[in-house]
């Protein structure tokens, strides 16, 4: 005799939780590589920082789209 698990609540929130893994990994890679690049080329700090922040903004935009999508396309 098995136990049947029931999922209650919005499946969109579960989907967003799973979708947030990608941008989280992306932000970690961006800042990790940015710090490494600054350590190798300290004189290029301004350019590296600018590109690092641009990558961060674009990656976070994906997370925000994932947050809004279940509300737009739900029921």
Image: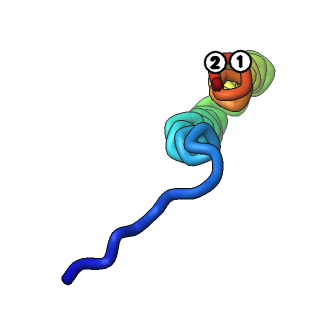
Residue at the bottom extreme of this rendering: 1
Q: Which residue is drawn at 72% across and 26% down?
A: 71
The N terminus: image quadrant: bottom left
Question: SS for tag 1?
Answer: helix
Location of residue 66 in the rendering, given as x and y in whole percent from the top left corner: 63, 27
Q: Is residue 32 visible?
A: no
Please name the colour scheme applied to the rendered image: rainbow
Q: Please determine whether, in this image, residue 69 is positioned above or below residue 39.
A: above
Q: Which mark is residue 72?
A: 1
Location of residue 36 in the rendering, given as x and y in whole percent from the top left corner: 57, 41
Location of residue 72 in the rendering, given as x and y in whole percent from the top left corner: 71, 18
Q: Residues within 10 Å of mark 1 (few under 14, many from 20)?
A: few
Q: Residue 73 carries which label?
A: 2
Count of residue discs: 2
Q: Which residue is drawn at 60% across and 37% down?
A: 12
Task: Indicate the quadrant where residue 52 lies.
Answer: top right
Nearest the viewer among 11 and 51 is: 11
Q: Residue at x 62, y 30 (%)?
A: 41
């Amino acid at each position: 005799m098995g136990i049947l698990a029931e999922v209650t609540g919005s499946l969109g929130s579960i989907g967003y939780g799973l979708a947030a893994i990608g941008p989280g990994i992306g932000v970690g890679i961006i800042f990790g590589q940015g710090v490494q690049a600054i350590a190798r080329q300290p004189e290029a700090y301004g350019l590296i920082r600018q590109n690092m922040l641009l990558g961060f903004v674009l990656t976070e935009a994906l997370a925000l789209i994932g947050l809004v999508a279940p509300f737009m396309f739900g029921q």
